[in-house]
Amino acid sequence: MTTVRQRLNRATVIDMAADLADTHGIDAVSLQRIANDAGVKQPALYRHVTGIEELWKLLALRARDFLARSLREAQQGHTRRDAVTAVARAWRLFVQQHPGLYSATDRVPSTGDAEIEESLAQVVAELTHALDGYELSAAQQAQCARSLRSALHGFCVLEKDNGHPEPYALNEGLANMVDLFCRGVEALEESK
């Protein structure tokens, strides 16, 4: 099989890495594999990325950007419990459709890099927005958004990585988790 040489730029390299991650898993992503797939020698990639660490970062930024947009679109026209349910389903769908790209978010630390911190802040902002219909203080709303992020990330990573060893009704599990979360938020409202 002859590999067709592709014209490369930064976006193409990221596209190839994201496709490779989603098709074969994040561990399959390497500069050598991307170079082989592009029909170039690995040093040609260094015009577009400085190395694998930068590529992980670029994939994480793309994943969080796509995720934030998905959450924003999902919650439009919804409020309270319906908004939380919509973002939960959107988060899960994103991970199901882009398992490798989503895995890139765990490849780089969430702190210490302004771009990464901002991308994470955008995701949390969308979760915070989903909670706008609840009567919470700003501090409570922020804490609830971070808790929701943790719950959704954990649920989706367990599903993606086959972390539920026993038979488990995942749709029902997600609905139950959202219900428990919303009951907790409603209890916070009542305690004001």
Image: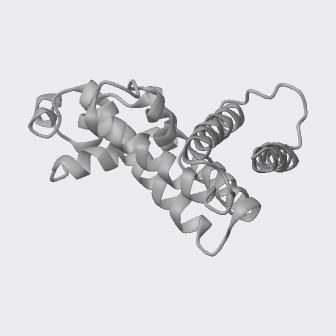
Q: Indicate the colouring scheme.
A: one colour
Residue 116 figure quarter = top left
Residue at figure coordinates x 68%, y 67% from the top left: 79
Res 18 seen here: no
Pinpoint residue 3: horizontal percent, then vertical percent: 26, 45
User: For this rendering, which residue is in front, 50 or 74?
Assistant: 74
Q: Is residue 14 above or below residue 105?
A: below
Q: Residue at x 47, y 28 (%)?
A: 106
Relative image position of residue 180 (x, y in whole percent): 84, 43
Point out the residue furthest to the front here.
192
In the shown orientation, is residue 139 left or right of residue 19?
right
Does residue 57 sit above or below 183 in this rendering? above
- Please report the residue visible at 62 percent of the width from the left and 34 percent of the height from the top: 150
Rendering coords of residue 126 (x, y %):
51, 55
- Can residue 25 be seen? yes
Q: Whole-percent x and y of residue 122?
A: 42, 49
The one nearer the camera, 177 or 102, is: 177
